[in-house]
Image: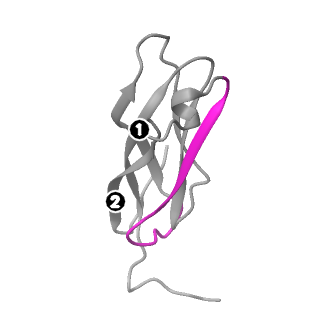
Amino acid sequence: MKKFISHPIGVDQGEKILFSEFAEGGGMWTGEGPRERSAEIRFSETFRSVPVVQIGVALWDVDTSSALRAEVKAEDITEDGFKAIFRTWSDTKIARIRVVWTAIGDLSHEDDWDIA
């Protein structure tokens, strides 16, 4: 659990198309086995400490002739951003994915002291 004591709280959110590979015959659409795509996401403002990030799928364009297998994660989260990761495997065919995300964390305040 993340607890906030006395700093202002910031909520940043956005969405990102991670890939669209149907038209070009890319590996997510034509391939098999483990596959991964990622994108760097930058927050609109730097958080004071590492925020909590929630990520989900907003657009899911898939072939339904096989089982749908997917993992969506936020990795390498810092005060400035994170990496949005999409993974699939086996014979799942994914044409395109758009993710949405929300980051919640404490922000710096003008009264913060820098004792360095």
Residue 34 position within the rendered picture, expressed as x and y whole percent measured from the top left? 67, 28
- Magenta stretch containing residue 42, yes or no? yes
Mark drawn on residue 97: 1
Q: Disc 1 marks which amino acid?
A: Ile
Which residue is painted at 40% across and 85% down in the image? 111
The answer to whether 89 is drawn above or below residue 46 in the figure is above
Which residue is painted at 58% across and 35% down in the image? 27
Q: Quadrant of the C terminus?
A: bottom right
Q: Disc 2 marks which amino acid?
A: Asp
Quick check: can you spot residue 115? Answer: yes
Residue 59 position within the rendered picture, expressed as x and y whole percent measured from the top left? 33, 36
Q: Sequence-wise, which precedes: disc 1 or disc 2? A: 2
Identify the residue under disc 2.
12
**Contact? badges 1 and 2 (CB < 8 Å):** no
In the image, the segment drawn in magenta is: 33-50
Q: Secondary structure at mark 1?
A: strand
Mark 1 closeness class: few <14, some 14–19, many ≥20 residues within 10 Å: some
Q: Is residue 11 left or right of residue 81?
A: left
Quick check: can you spot residue 71? Answer: no
Q: Is residue 32 left or right of residue 74?
A: right
- Magenta stretch containing residue 4, yes or no? no
* Front: mark 1 or 2: 1
The answer to whether 64 is drawn above or below residue 77 in the figure is above
